[in-house]
């Protein structure tokens, strides 16, 4: 079956959207740079999902219009699909994987995330631009218990069983990029499965995760990486965290949320225009 790809014009426009200049050779350096550029340019966000009240389209043309042309963001099923298309279109060997968010929780969450696997120079790597939280600002080699430092953050892939892996992170107490300010510890952020999966399989997951009563459908969230931290919106609060210091601003109504999304994330929710 033919794999979806962006055409040359779409690819170059997408690269410009994330601030990428020049060629994009198929190398680890390029891969890491594309991940970081995307995380710093395209927000994880549910504002459009909340505002429009319907499951977002996962068709390539619709995603391209939303993320590249209209300069909005999206949640994992949108962002990681588009990023996979970008990587494939510049020459990387890439496929999706089933994943679940953990974020240090004790209990098990259902499969609720689309991840991305890249095969490069004989190694399998994980990349993610749609998690909306602590995952590497670059690629991570899938090798059991190999500690890897990515832009100052320490991650450790861990084999769970024959099919499932975890991505653990070493938090940094008060210096933690994501504000996990308890004692420094190793915690699981994400689990993913190596089993082959088709792109169409994510349509039902996206549908389930965008129903009323889910956090994605009912809560306006946004997150974008910055050079020394991140900006986020959650539970009606704007959090700007730089160099380990957070400045939190309550957003009192929908107008304040829309203004913060425009100022800090570069877009206004569609129905709020």
Image: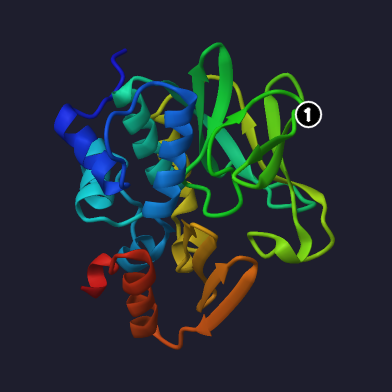
Total labels: the figure holds 1
Where is residue 180, by image quadrant?
bottom right
Residue 33 in the image: state x and y as whole percent: 44, 38
Residue 30 in the image: state x and y as whole percent: 42, 30
Provide the secondary structure element on which disc 1 rests: loop
- Vertical relation: 271 (above or below) 130: below
The residue that label 1 is drawn on is 145
Task: Give the residue at x 84% y 61%.
Answer: 183
Location of the N terminus by quadrant is top left
Task: Give the residue at x 21% y 35%.
Answer: 12
Instruction: Note whether residue 207 is visible.
Output: no
Residue 51 in the image: state x and y as whole percent: 33, 68
Q: Nearer the viewer, residue 160 or 9?
A: 9
- Vertical relation: 30 (above or below) 54: above
Task: Give the residue at x 73% y 19%.
Answer: 162
Q: Nearer the viewer, residue 49 or 147?
A: 147
Question: Dot 1, how many residues are within 10 Å of its Cα: few (below 14), some (14-19), or many (20+)?
Answer: few
Location of the C terminus by quadrant is bottom left
């Amino acid at each position: 079956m033919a794999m979806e790809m962006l055409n040359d014009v779409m690819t170059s426009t997408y690269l410009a959207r994330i601030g990428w200049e020049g060629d994009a050779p198929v190398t680890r350096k390029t891969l890491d740079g594309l991940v970081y550029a995307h995380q710093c340019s395209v927000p994880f966000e549910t504002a459009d999902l909340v505002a429009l009240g319907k499951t977002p389209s996962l068709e390539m043309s619709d995603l391209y219009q939303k993320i590249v042309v209209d300069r909005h963001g999206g949640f994992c099923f949108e962002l990681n699909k588009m990023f996979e298309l970008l990587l494939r279109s510049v020459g990387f060997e890439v496929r999706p994987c089933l994943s679940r968010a953990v974020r240090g929780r004790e209990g098990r969450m259902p499969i609720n995330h689309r991840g991305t696997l890249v095969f490069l120079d004989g190694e399998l790597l994980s990349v993610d631009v749609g998690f909306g939280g602590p995952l590497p600002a670059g690629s991570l080699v899938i090798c059991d218990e190999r500690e890897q430092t990515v832009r100052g953050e320490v991650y450790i892939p861990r084999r769970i069983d024959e099919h499932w892996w975890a991505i653990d992170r070493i938090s940094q107490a008060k210096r933690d990029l994501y504000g996990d300010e308890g004692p420094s510890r190793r915690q699981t952020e994400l689990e993913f499965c190596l089993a082959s999966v088709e792109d169409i399989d994510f349509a039902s997951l996206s549908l389930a995760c965008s129903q009323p009563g889910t956090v994605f459908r009912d809560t306006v969230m946004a997150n974008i990486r910055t050079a020394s931290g991140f900006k986020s919106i959650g539970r009606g609060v704007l959090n700007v965290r730089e160099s380990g210091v957070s400045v939190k601003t309550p957003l009192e109504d929908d107008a304040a949320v829309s203004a913060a999304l425009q100022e800090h994330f570069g877009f206004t929710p569609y129905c709020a225009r």
